[in-house]
Image (cartoon, rainbow, N blue to C red):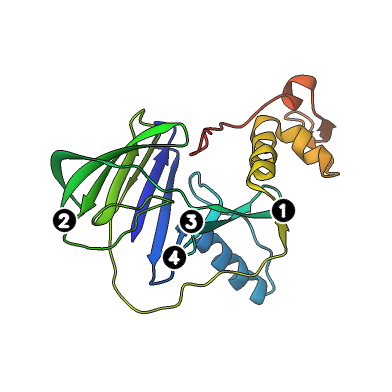
Amino acid sequence: MSFPSSAGKDSNYVDMRIVEIGHNCRKDYSSYIEKMELEGRKLADEGKNFVDFLEGNVNPFELFVFAGQDRCRFNYKTIVLGPILQWEEKQTVFDWTLTNDADTVCGFPCHTAETDFAGRSYRAWYCPEIPVDAGPYKFDGLPGLILKIEDCSGSYVWEAVGIEKGTWPIYEKRYLFQKCSRKQARQYIKLMFDNPYMYLTSRGIRVTQADVHTRRMRELTEEEKSESFYFDPIELE
């Protein structure tokens, strides 16, 4: 399934997610990052330098949910060739409240349900005609495939735009992971967004800026060092 996932109540924050659903595992990942990596490999094979052409804003993780094992695994890519964090955690058991509303999503008739998860309240649209207990991100536990789900504050929305049925392996890429706990990962990622200068210097990277007049590299000002990135994680708790 293909899910454009938007964040920040802003159309500029859109990530096209692919959700692959198998008998034993499902995988949620960014098609934008997949495209970038494929292009990078192609250029490397041709002996050319790779230029990051990543479009839009993405959540740079792969999520694996393992059926019957009560666990899920994240592989999270940090910025500027930083480590790829990997951690496992217990899969969430969602407490859904079924409602009487109905709508059509991606051409399929859907019913609605509501739940609270990790500091946000959600409404989901699921299709009983597709008896698959799954959805985007960690969401599952409804009597039908979840085709749309949104945070009631409007910060996050996933809505299916395509479904393809077929047979192919769900695979996990092999990286040199930096394994950690969920708590350690959240602290690391928060620092990366809240203070990217401190994050980079803590990794031994010298950060400079091209002067707009002389085009020479210069040290950052104190104001530039304190700049942060927009950060509104899916899970607030």
Q: Amino acid at mark 3?
A: Tyr
Tag 3: Cα neighbours inside 10 Å, few (<14), some, or many (≥20)? many
Where does residue 40 sit, x and y in percent of width and height?
Answer: 61, 65
Residue plotted at (61% across, 52% down): 76
- Mark 4 crowdedness (10 Å alpha carbons): few <14, some 14-19, many ≥20: few
Q: Residue type at mark 2?
A: Phe
Element type at mark 4: loop
Residue 32 badge: 3
Foreground mark, 3 or 4, reads: 4
Residue 47: x and y in percent read: 69, 73
Give the mark nearest the N terminus, 1 or 4. Answer: 4
Marks 3 and 4, the one that precedes in the sequence? 3
Relative to 175, 26 lies left or right: left
Callout 2: SS: strand
Viewer-side label of 1, 2: 2
Q: Is residue 115 left or right of residue 174?
A: left
- Secondary structure beneath dot 1 equals loop
Which residue matches tag 1?
81
